[in-house]
Image (spheres, grey):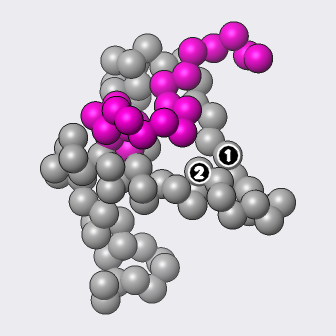
């Protein structure tokens, strides 16, 4: 519809590719920008359903991107995103 090529479209067959997107989404802005430019990304669309009550949005799935990304980027560890969070999961 938008005449744009997608990088990720709910397809998990290419773990390296999904892992790269997970790495981008979990990196600081400078690193994410560089990696996005390497993929020739112009736009990033993330859905947030919190206000509408849709809880199957990208926010709910971001830890899955990190889990998958760990295969391509071993330094990407899910636990790192718990211990400094405000979610009360520091004891995990």
Instruction: Name the disc covering residue 58, or none.
Output: 2
Would you say residue 45 is visible in this rendering? yes
* Quarter residue 91 falls in: bottom left
- Expressed as whole percent of the image width and height from the top left, the position of residue 79 reads 28, 69
Question: On screen, 76 above or below 22?
Answer: below
Bin the neighbour count of mark 2 within 10 Å (Cα to Cα): few under 14, some 14-19, many 20 and up: some
| Label 1: element kind | loop
The residue positioned farthest toward the right in the image shown: 52
For residue 78, side relative to residue 11 (left or right):
left
Instruction: Name the disc covering residue 5, or none.
Output: none
The magenta segment:
1-23
For residue 37, side relative to residue 80 (left or right):
right
* Quarter residue 88 falls in: bottom left
Bin the neighbour count of mark 1 within 10 Å (Cα to Cα): few under 14, some 14-19, many 20 and up: few
For residue 68, side relative to residue 73 (left or right):
right
| Label 2: element kind | helix
Mark 1 and mark 2: Cα distance apart in space:
5 Å
- Expressed as whole percent of the image width and height from the top left, the position of residue 66 reads 35, 53
- Expressed as whole percent of the image width and height from the top left, the position of residue 75 reads 17, 51
Q: CB under 8 Å between callouts 1 and 2?
A: yes
Query: Which residue is painted at 54% across and 39% down in the image?
Result: 10
Reply yes or no: does residue 19 show up in magenta.
yes
Instruction: Name the disc covering residue 47, or none.
Output: 1
């Amino acid at each position: 519809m938008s005449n744009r090529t997608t990088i990720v479209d709910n397809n998990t067959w290419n773990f390296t590719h999904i892992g790269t997107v997970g790495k981008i989404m979990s990196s600081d802005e400078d690193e994410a920008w560089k990696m996005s430019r390497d993929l020739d990304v112009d736009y990033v669309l993330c859905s947030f359903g919190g206000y509408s009550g849709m809880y199957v949005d990208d926010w709910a799935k971001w830890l899955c991107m990190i889990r998958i990304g760990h295969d391509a980027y071993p330094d990407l560890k899910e636990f790192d995103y718990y211990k400094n969070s405000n979610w009360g999961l520091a004891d995990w």
